[in-house]
Image (cartoon, grey):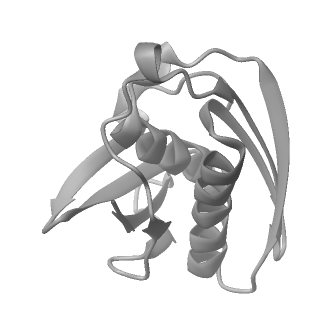
Amino acid sequence: MSGDGNPADWTHFPHEGDVGVRGFGRDMAEAFENTARAMTAVVVPLDLIRRERVIPVTCRAADPAILLLDWLNAVIYIMATEKMLFCDFRVRIDGETLEGEMEGENVVPERHEPSVELKGATLTELAVYRQADGRWFAQCVVDV
């Protein structure tokens, strides 16, 4: 799924000084996309981010939860090193390999007014699984 995601497809949950992010989807890839949206929305509302540049990302991990962790940390790394914010995420998962794209723009402090800096996705409350209703669930706590 591309686009800004439906807020019902992602959410935040409190966790001491940090923030938890959750994504849901029809498949694991969509849940990962929505978890990245939830994470970005911690920093700035997604509707303030323009689609100006696409950045590719590749991650590999045998465990789906570690793959989520690697994906989110790749997003955080690129946000920090390229000074960008992303509003759209596209993920394809084939076995242990995640091929993703992130679309966004360089940070414009006056317009975006970032509320926090993301430091890293953590192992805390890390989970990826298919729910009883068939939808996928992905979550972790992000250090801010």
Q: Is residue 84 left or right of residue 134?
A: right
Q: Quadrant of the N terminus?
A: top right
- At a point 60% along the width and 51% down the height, the residue shown is 80
> Quick check: 67 above or below 31?
below
Figure quadrant of residue 105: top right
User: In the displayed structure, would residue 63 be above or below residue 141?
Assistant: below
- Report the residue at 54% width, 21% height from top: 108
Residue 73 rendering spot, x and y as whole percentages: 60, 65
- Horizontal relation, residue 100 to residue 84: left or right: right
Residue 135 image offset from top left, x and y in percent: 49, 51
Q: Nearer the viewer, residue 26 or 101?
A: 101
In the rendered structure, the answer to whether residue 97 lies left or right of residue 77 reads right
Give the residue displayed 75% in from the left and 86% down from the top. 62
Q: Residue at x 41, y 63 (%)?
A: 139
Question: Residue 58: x and y, percent?
Answer: 85, 62
Give above or below for 119 relative to 109.
Answer: below
| Vertical arrangement, residue 88 with respect to residue 125, above or below | above
In this rendered view, identify the residue nearer to me: 106 or 56.
106
Q: Residue furthest front?
A: 110
Which part of the image, by quadrant, shows the C terminus?
bottom left
Query: Depth check: 28 or 109 in front?
Result: 109
Q: In the image, residue 117 lies at what x, y percent?
A: 40, 50
